[in-house]
Image: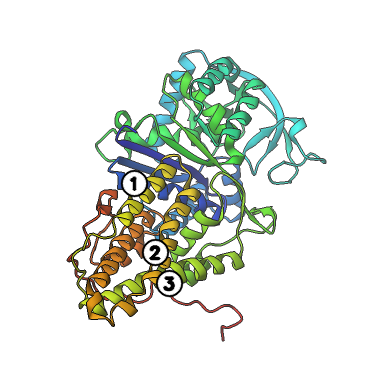
Amino acid sequence: MDGRFYITTPIYYVNAEPHVGHAYSTIMSDILARHHRQRGDDTFFLTGTDEHGDKIARAADALGRTPKEHTDIISARFRELWGTFELSHDFFIRTTDPDHIAWVQRILERIHEAGDIYKDTYGGWYCTSCEAFYAEGDLLEGNLCPQHRRPVEWVEEENWFFRLSAYRDRLLRLFDENPTFVRPAHRLNEARRIVEQVEDISISRANVTWGVPVPWDPEHVVYVWVDALLNYVTAPHYAVPGQDLSERLWPADLHVIGKDILKFHAVIWPALLMAADIEPPRSIFIHGFILKGGERLSKTTGNLIDPLPYVERYGIDALRWYLAREIRFGEDGPFSDEGFAQRYTSELANEYGNLVSRVVSMVSRYRDGVVPSDPGGDQEFAGLVAERAAAVSAALDEYDVTVAAEEAWKLIRRLNRLVEERQPWVLAKDPERASDLDQVLVTLTECVRAASILLWPFMPAVCERALAALGAPLSAPMLSDIAWGNASGAVLAPLDGQLFPRVESPAEAP
């Protein structure tokens, strides 16, 4: 760690409405960004929308819109949803931004002048939905796209090509010298297999008008994937008006992407950067698919999940927790109504929400809402807090969001057992055990405060409410706020309603 952290999500294609798959990548990135802010790192979090390409033009035409009208509408819906999710991104890039377009052209000019772009005729099987070409061996039976299971079309045209094959050895050397360049490790092996068979790629389209014009040949537009990939390096140049943050932020520390775009990010992207004499990013994390009924979420199959009903029913923090907890980051994982309800009730409401409520209630009842001085008899719990904080930080530093959630929850479970072991309501009946009661109340308050700080990257709004009730009204708490001893003397406040109110099941609803 060098005191700064630049993290990006994929930029989302605006041919259709956002769904929970888009939310997943962005929420996981938000958790990591918040963790690094807690560490005190100079953090920059980038997300946005990918708005060029033939598919966008076709989708707009089908709706009677111009491409720009269409992208304005759909991009705004992504921004609105990110606002609903209370995401902490620092900049939302659009590939229709004039500054982005200008930087794309500058970078491609640099690659062209270096001799790594040439003109040739290309023929290949093209999927409009993917905006990607496929080799015949990669297609499903019946010439279907392996991602969308729709017929591909043969496209033959004169295009500008990038000498990707010339970077085969440099890419393999990058993988050898930086074994965490692609995570998890098995995805690096996948990238290596792709590189070993890589060929030159087309980087322009001659028969598409909605895109960034190739600067030395305006009859062509830049292939949409090249345009989109460059957003990670163009955004720092203009994200803050009047400032160029590129020297401060680049190379990016982490790109978070889905496994279906591994080739573009782990192979084509670093090669383009090498050709432009720009350092590659430090790491790319490949997550899996969210599954519904055992199948990947897909517009084609119609099994998309709208996240908004879950937010309306359970709250945004419950959705954030479920995605982090249920789906192991880096692997495929299921999304189900039953699993969501179970996690909400058993973990969030019963284990965490009830724990916070009991601690606030007991301090209010037995000590008039003021946390007593620490008698100093629970140093083992001070050690436990430090241990859990170290475990959570270590997991998040390695981008293991799901393990970090479990490490934090171990503290919640232990505290619930502590309440049952010490039984403060029994101690309160015996004046001679006042010191024992003081000890358990201060220990519980210290530990629940610490747990809430550790859980804040996952559930920021709920944890800030819990901290306010526990006498620590912290907005964006730092890891340093966990220090033992901060709770003694704190004045607690009434909890503003239940952290996780009971939610009727569909069968109970009128």
Which quadrant of the figure has residue 184? top right
User: Which amino acid, by three-letter code, is at mark 1?
Assistant: Asp
Q: Secondary structure at mark 2?
A: helix
- Whole-angstrom CA distance, mark 1 to mark 3, is 29 Å
Q: CA distance from mark 2 to mark 3?
A: 18 Å
Q: Tell me the quadrant of the picture where the C terminus can be found.
A: bottom right
Amino acid at pointer 2: Leu
Mark nearer the N terminus (1 vs 3): 1
Q: In the displayed structure, does residue 263 sit left or right of residue 476?
A: right
Q: Is residue 247 above or below residue 209?
A: above
| Pointer 2 local density, CA inside 10 Å: few below 14, some 14–19, many at least 20 | many
Q: Secondary structure under badge 1?
A: loop
Residue depicted at 60% across the width and 50% down the height: 59
Please indicate, yes or no, whether residue 92 appears anywhere in the rendered image: no
Residue hosting label 1: 90
Kind of residue at badge 3:
Phe
Task: Work out whether residue 339 or residue 24 is closer to the camera in this orientation and state it.
Answer: 339
Residue 347 placement, left or right of 56: left
Disc nearest the viewer among 2 and 3: 2
Q: How would you rate the neighbour count of disc 1 (Cα within 10 Å): few for under 14, some for 14-19, many for 20 or more?
A: few
Residue nearest the observer in this picture, 161 or 441: 441
Task: Say whether disc 2 or disc 1 marks the residue closer to the N-terminus.
Answer: 1
Q: What residue is disc 2 on? A: 415
Q: Nearer the viewer, mark 2 or mark 1?
A: 2
| Mark 2–mark 3 CB contact (< 8 Å) | no
Residue at image mark 3: 500
SS assignment at label 3: loop
